[in-house]
Image: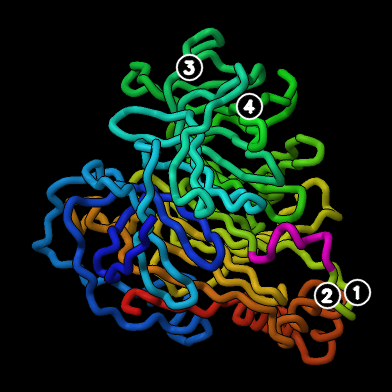
Amino acid sequence: MDMERVPTENIDRRNGGCGVILESKLYVWGGNGSDIHYPFRDMQPVQDSDSSSNSDSNDSEEEEDIDPNFEVKTIVTLPRPNDENHPFDVLDLSTNEWFRQSTSGEYPTLGLGSSLSVHHPSRTIILFSGFKDVQFDNEVYKVSPDREWVWEKVEVMSEVKPSERYLTGVIIHKDRMYVFGGVGKAIREIGDPPQPQDPGAKYLVYVEDGVERDYGWTSEYLEFNINTSEWEAPLDKDAFRPDQLGSHAFSKFDSHRAVLFGGNGSLVYSNTCYIFDFDTTEWSGPYNPDDPEEPWPIATRFSTLTSLVDPERVLQEMYEGCGQILQPRMVLLWGKSSRMHISPETWLLEFNFDNPKNPLVWKKLRIGVEPRSWHIARAIYSDTTTSCEVVVFGGNMYKYPNTDSLERNNAANLKILHFGLASLVDICLRVIVSREELMNVAEGSYGSGYKAKLIRAHSRHANCPLITDITHL
């Protein structure tokens, strides 16, 4: 199938889309867009995060120039129903040029809040679930460049099948697709159609003004065997699992584990975390801050959680000549903190498994990018394992009360966040601040108040990625 170059200004603003990186290209599918293209406005480059103009409050973040007279006529779910080519929007990350990759076949029509993943051994893009016009989906679709970009709806070979949903958490690990939670068709008890196949799953029906609605949240956990096209429900009825959730972040952080953060069940937003082990098929948690002063993200939905180190190499590979095991690190970006507000927070997540009660260690980041929610964030890993780039595309940037249309605030620009190894200064400060005996020596040598100075210095140097704005490239 053909792939044609497309001007940047013709790429739809959207939220609720999904995307994957395959062979140095970002493939974007679905989401909510508009029937007309939004004009791109000239913007000043984002200041490097170590600039004095940057702050934790994000006061210096860029503002897009939005035409106050601009009006959205119609909101559509992408790809457009009248587009016979059903294309992916594709960003070539080696040239920063946009293309449209035409597809054919039995393509997925419910393109909002779907989950898109890559099965790398077969170079296959796999899509699960979705929403459009009060319809939910539970089908699996796949497409591959090796099969001329022809979509195929997978014929499921098992009686087990997930309930219809979107906003679910999906990870492909080896030859299986792992699915947890989501928002979908209301299931009030076992026996409701469609028949739930996970005996330990719970369902929470949305209630508004005392009336039960036709959708709700689930704690279903299922696995899909990519080679046999069979669904399985491996958890026992009484096995521990997270509560009913949708819109959560669910991502691998090493070669055999993943972490789940946030989401919501009904109108209650969460900042609770859980860890899932693919080898044992077990959940652990819940993990919450041990005390109110502990650094911890606020409750959000529609956040993204992205590993800054290739998960397949964590705990398996060692730096040559150093004898140091590669440690997992992740970045949490923004999200929706209430019905009408976007969280400005960005966080670095590290792990300390010497503390089994709560192995998660959160550190606040300073990133000079305007916050958004329901965006795409995908990582490009370096062969040297010393650096990583996170590609951020789309999302919604609500600016109440400055606009009467949510869709007008879909992000137009694409950002690339560059993360690298910590500087020598940061490493030294991190070691000193983490060891009480060193802090006491410093204060004894340099006087009262020196501990606080070291802590402030460490905060200034901590993990500030560089930003590339490729809106106009």
Q: Where residue 44 sits in the image (x, y, percent)?
A: 31, 83
Spatial separation of the CA atoms under disc 4 and disc 3: 19 Å
Q: Mark 1 sits on what residue?
A: 323
- 1 or 3: tag closer to the N-terminus: 3
Q: Mark 4 sits on what residue?
A: 231
Specify the segment rendered in magenta. 308-317
Task: Name above or below for residue 215 compared with residue 471.
Answer: above
The residue at the far bottom in this view is 446
Spatial separation of the CA atoms under disc 2 and disc 4: 38 Å
Task: Look at the image and tell me whether residue 336 can be seen.
Answer: no
- Amino acid type of the residue tagged 2 in the rendering: Tyr
Instruction: Identify which residue is drawn at 80% across, 84% down.
Output: 443
Q: Where residue 137 sits in the image (x, y, percent)?
A: 43, 30
Q: Main secondary structure of the magenta part?
A: loop
| Comparing labels 1 and 4, the label whose residue is closer to the camera | 4
| Comparing labels 4 and 3, the label whose residue is closer to the camera | 4
Task: Tell me the crowding category of disc 3: few under 14, some 14 to 19, or many 20 or more residues within 10 angstroms, Cα based.
Answer: many
In contact (CB < 8 Å): disc 4 and disc 3: no
Task: Tell me the crowding category of disc 1: few under 14, some 14 to 19, or many 20 or more residues within 10 angstroms, Cα based.
Answer: few
